[in-house]
Image: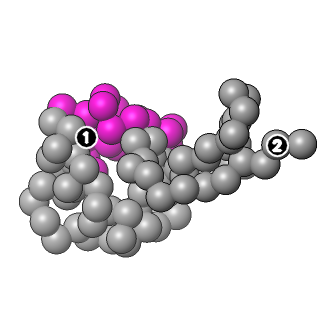
């Protein structure tokens, strides 16, 4: 049996948490969060679907700190397997 392991790697997939509310301080964070709400809604999204990837990463940093958006962890396996992370 092959075990999957979680490693520190740059996450690109996030999902908005509708149960948390917080007024973001940075202008960039508010703009990125607004774009996420319009484009993705409650569904997981990739950073690449946002307008400017660099600006999006900076804006998402504050949103992740205050649990408005949760990052999906990157999971690695030693053999080529399909690994899925489903959260209900």
Which image quarter is the N terminus in? Answer: top right
Number of the label disc, if any, that sits on residue 35: 1
Number of the label disc, if any, that sits on residue 43: none
Q: Position of residue 28 (x, y in %)?
A: 12, 55
**Residue drawn at x 68%, y 41% as measured from the top left:** 77
Residue count near mark 2 (Cα–Cα under 10 Å), binned few <14, some 14–19, many ≥20:
few
> Farthest right residue?
1
Q: Is residue 46 visible?
A: yes
Residue identified by numbered label 2:
2
Query: Which of the pair 75/1 is nearer the observer?
Result: 1
Q: Position of residue 16 (x, y in %)?
A: 45, 51
Does the magenta run of residues contain 39?
yes
**Residue drawn at x 44%, y 52% as measured from the top left:** 9
Gap in angstroms between the C-alphas marked 1 and 2: 39 Å
Q: Reply above or below: 37 against 71.
A: above
Element assignment for label 1: helix
Does the magenta run of residues contain 4?
no
Q: Is residue 38 visible?
A: no
Query: Which of the pair 37/49 is nearer the observer?
Result: 49
Specify the segment rendered in magenta. 33-51
Q: Is residue 71 left or right of residue 37?
A: right
Q: Quadrant of residue 68?
A: bottom left
Q: Position of residue 86 (x, y in %)?
A: 70, 43
Q: Reply above or below: 87 against 25.
A: above
Q: Reply above or below: 75 against 58.
A: above
> Farthest left residue?
27
Q: Is residue 20 left or right of residue 86?
A: left
**Residue drawn at x 30%, y 31% as measured from the top left:** 48
Q: Earlier in the sequence, mark 1 or mark 2?
A: 2
Mark 1 touches mark 2? (CB < 8 Å): no
> What colour scheme governs how the chains and residues are painted in the rendered image of this protein?
one colour
């Amino acid at each position: 049996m092959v075990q999957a392991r979680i490693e520190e790697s740059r996450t690109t997939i996030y999902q908005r948490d509708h149960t948390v509310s917080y007024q973001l301080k940075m202008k960039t964070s508010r703009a990125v969060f607004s774009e996420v709400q319009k484009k993705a809604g409650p569904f997981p999204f990739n950073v690449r679907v946002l307008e400017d990837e660099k600006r999006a990463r900076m804006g998402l940093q504050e949103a992740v700190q205050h649990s408005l958006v949760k990052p999906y962890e990157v999971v690695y396996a030693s053999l080529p397997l399909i690994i899925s992370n489903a959260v209900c």
